[in-house]
Amino acid sequence: MSDNGSTMIQPRLIQPATEDEVVDMLVQQAQFDGTPEMRAVAVKLLESGYTLRVVASKLGIAASVIWKWADDAEIRKALRTGNEYRRQVINQRLEAAADDAVTALGRVVADANVAPRDRIKAAEAILDRCGLVDATSSPDNATMIAVDIDFDDRLARIVAGSAPKTGQPD
């Protein structure tokens, strides 16, 4: 820590590979080159969406061995296919999360125990996200916002059963 209490970041030095590590990588490269079955498995794993580092780990070889083959058309195609597959999986997960979020907002809107202001905000979020309401394209957007705030306050007071504050219009 420094004198002012903040944590200082220490730079990391990257150690060059030792002679033994270089020899090991060369041996792994030769094994990979000489084993079409291992290369075929690597291609299948890459196409299945595994990252290059994970494939290397699963095959028990250094990632640099597979990186050397990244210029090869078959490996490049497997990497592209795997990347696209991962994108599709992630998109499906995001769509499921979005569906859960809309469901949660719907529950807030429908829950009579939630404060009216929060229910209205949840309803606005739903309408805004689905494209049914585009308040930003309106020339009177500032007026709409002011009216919405005033409406929210009045609705909250009505639901709560309180009278308006003195000097404020209903």
Image (spheres, rainbow, N blue to C red):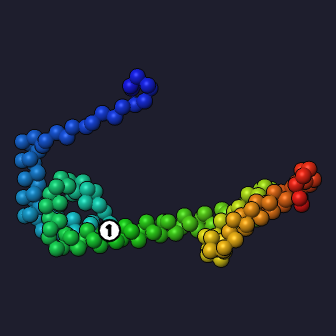
Residue 123 in view in this figure: no
Where is residue 123 shown, x and y percent of the image?
71, 66
Direction top: furthest residue: 3
Q: Quadrant of residue 52?
A: bottom left
Residue 154 in view in this figure: yes
Image-based side of 109 in relation to 99, left or right? right
Where is residue 102 shown, x and y percent of the image?
63, 66
Image-based side of 63 in relation to 95, left or right? left
Residue visible at 27% across and 66% down in the picture? 45
Look at mark 1 in the image and give the residue it sits on.
Answer: 83
Q: Quadrant of residue 146?
A: bottom right
Residue visible at 19% across and 40% down in the picture? 14
Query: 110 or 161: which is nearer to us?
Result: 161
Direction bottom: furthest residue: 132
Residue 18's place in the image compared with 120, above or below, is above
Where is residue 13 shown, x and y percent of the image?
21, 37
Q: Element type at marker 1?
A: helix
Query: 86 or 134: which is nearer to us?
Result: 134
Residue visible at 88% across and 54% down in the picture? 168
Image quarter hosting the C terminus = bottom right
Image quarter hosting the N terminus = top left
Residue 129's place in the image compared with 58, above or below, is below
Q: Amino acid at mark 1?
A: Asn
